[in-house]
Image: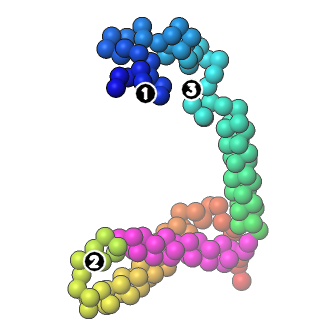
Amino acid sequence: MSVKQFKGGRGNFEGGGDDNWPPAERPSQRRPMDGSKPRNIQETQAWKDSTGGLQKIWKNYLNLLGRTFQQLSRAEQERYIERFSITIAVGAACVMSSFFYWFLPPLVRVLVVPVFIGAAWWAGSKLIAPQVIDRFSQYLKAEEQY
């Protein structure tokens, strides 16, 4: 069975050049690279419109978060920063523990995981949160004097 008998066969391919293609289907003429057609999907107008819309939604969401954060009292702002710090610390502890969890014996697993998460909780609330609050104090509301 020769190549011509297969569906889509173009004839003698031993030459190796573009001479085996009919003139209208040569690779250089099938996809013009002169800029008239996009080379990938990111150059299409539909892609640009959709990403522009998503960027507007993301910017509006960040503006909403910023406005609501600025409307909170100083204590509420610090509480949100502390919760965020705890969430990041516990999440990082879970990811790090997943690297070596399966190498531990079962009895040690039962003891290590709660201790590891508890230590991450303590570090998030007592070490990380005060540092973040101190670093971002210029963006927080002024402390209320009693």
> Dot 3 surroundings within 10 Å: few (below 14), some, or many (20 or more)?
few
Q: Is residue 35 left or right of residue 46?
A: left
Q: Secondary structure at mark 3?
A: loop
Q: Is residue 145 magenta?
A: no
Type of amino acid at the residue the image marks with label 2: Trp
Disc on res. 39? 3
Q: Is residue 45 visible?
A: yes
Q: Amino acid at mark 3?
A: Arg
**Residue 59 is at least partly visible in this image:** no
Magenta residues, as a range? 72-96
* In front: label 2 or label 1: 1
**Tag 1 or tag 3, which sits nearer the N-term?**
1
Q: Residue at x 62, y 77 (%)?
A: 79
Q: CA distance from mark 3 to mark 2?
A: 46 Å
Looking at the image, which residue is at 69% across and 46% down? 55
Residue 91 magenta-highlighted: yes
Expressed as whole percent of the image width and height from the top left, the position of residue 23 reads: 53, 8
**Disc number at residue 102?**
2
Under circle 2, the secondary element is helix
What residue does disc 1 label? 6
